[in-house]
Amino acid sequence: MADTVIVVALLLVAVSATAAVAVRDPVRQALVLSVLGVVLAVLFTVLQAPDVALSQLAVGSALTPLLLLLAVHKVKRRGRKEGRHR
């Protein structure tokens, strides 16, 4: 039973990581990266590492995608401003 749960969690990690690489839009990449963080946290919980899972939830599924979304928003806004001046 435990081995089956680990295999399923690993397959979910592989699928979500592949999706993060395959998506072209930066905003969607950040969202898929957030899903990957949650799936990794589930994997760490299954592997009995709850401290790592909590860190992954905080950093991998919340903070990093938020910073990426803010950076993409700032770059798009700056591109619009520079486009008006030309």
Image (cartoon, helix red, strand yellow):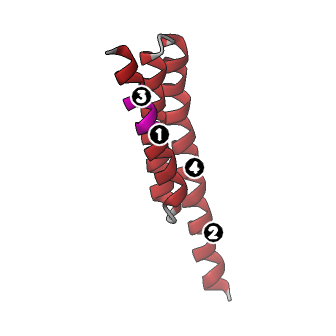
The range drawn in magenta is 7-13
Q: Earlier in the sequence, mark 3 or mark 2?
A: 3
Q: CA distance from mark 3 to mark 4?
A: 30 Å
* Residue type for callout 3: Val
* Residue type for callout 2: Arg
Q: Nearer the viewer, mark 4 or mark 1?
A: 1
* Occupied quadrant, residue 64: top right
* Residue type for callout 4: Leu
Residue on which disc 3 sits: 7
Of 49 and 8, the residue lying toward us: 8
Contact between marks 4 and 1 (CB within 8 A): the answer is no
Q: Is residue 64 above or below residue 84?
A: above
Is the C terminus in the top left, top right, bottom left or bottom right quadrant? Answer: bottom right
Residue on which disc 4 sits: 68
| Few, some or many residues within 10 Å of mark 2 (<14, 14–19, 20+) | few
Q: Secondary structure at mark 3?
A: helix
Residue on which disc 1 sits: 36
Q: In the drawing, does residue 22 fall left or right of residue 46? A: right
* Prevailing SS of the magenta stretch: helix
